Image (cartoon, rainbow, N blue to C red):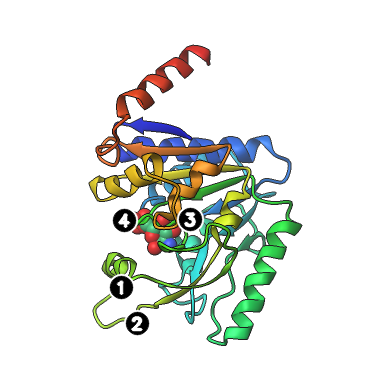
Amino acid sequence: MRVIILDSAKDVAQFAANTIIDTVNRKMRPTLGLATGSTPIEAYRAVIDAYKTNRVSFAQTVTFNLDEYIGIKEEHVQSYRYFMNQHLFNHIDIPLSNTFLPGAASLNEAQLHKNAHQYEEAIKKAGGIDLQLLGIGKNGHIGFNEPTSSLRSRTRIKSLSESTIEANKRLFKNGEYQPRLALTMGIETILESRQLLLLATGSTKANAVKDMVEGPLTAMCPASALQLHQDATIVIDSEAADKLVMKDYYLWCEQQRQDLE
Ligand code: GLP
């Protein structure tokens, strides 16, 4: 695991944007795994800036999002499809037909299982994911893989935990329906991406970051599964890094790397 501690959330966003841009510029047909939540919004803004100043084109890019709420139509303002269109896709040259999220609008269980399976197949058919962007929940979830998710899980239905519902409440208006189920890539699906980039900012993520990086590998902290990946980078601001016991070592490692580069 490479742990990069930067001064501010803005630096984290710029680092993430640069990684996305490099990946897209390096590959003939890049495949990106994307995330929602408030953390990646600034990074998407920086990506849009890069597109507008001709530093990158997404004309050949294919994207797969981590998750989608169940029972919410794509056009609904709370759907993750709506979020992605609004925060990224509508502002760059990616054909919308190349952007995928798990099909979760139905409330029919058999249909959702079928959609989950098809999503896995679509990722495979696209040749796998080159770079998967991730956030982290306060309880250590990635995508919507809540604590106790199987480390071998694949795209499937998950019930959101009370703590996630509570944390995401701020994004819903008073009285607005807040889904309690989601279709999410599994932990194994995520681990199959060739490169992982997890972003975390702010003090509310400090405990989850500590458990992910320095805690045991455990389903109680789904993000700890990143310890198994050969190319996982964790980019965090100083507040999110606050509880890391080996903080000085991670900073030292990055200094040594700069000498190399
Ligand atoms: C959401 C998403 C995750 C995201 C996390 C943190 O529930 N399913 O993909 O990483 O919660 O969100 P935020 O960045 O808003 O803290």
Report helix, strand or loop for mark 4: loop
Q: Are marks 2 and 4 in contact (CB under 8 Å)?
A: no
- Residue that mark 3 sits on: 35
Residue 70 percent across, percent down from the top left: 49, 77
| Rendered view: 105 above or below 154 | below
Q: Amino acid at mark 2?
A: Tyr
Crowd class of label 1 (few under 14; some 14 to 19; many from 20; radius 10 Å): few
Q: Earlier in the sequence, mark 3 or mark 4?
A: 3
Report helix, strand or loop for mark 2: loop
Crowd class of label 3 (few under 14; some 14 to 19; many from 20; radius 10 Å): many
Q: Amino acid at mark 4?
A: Lys
- Residue that mark 2 sits on: 177
Q: Are marks 3 and 4 in contact (CB under 8 Å)?
A: no
Viewer-nearest residue: 5 or 94: 5
- Residue that mark 1 sits on: 172
Q: Quadrant of residue 111?
A: bottom right
Q: Earlier in the sequence, mark 2 or mark 4?
A: 4
Q: Amino acid at mark 3?
A: Ala
Report helix, strand or loop for mark 1: loop
Residue 238 percent across, percent down from the top left: 27, 35
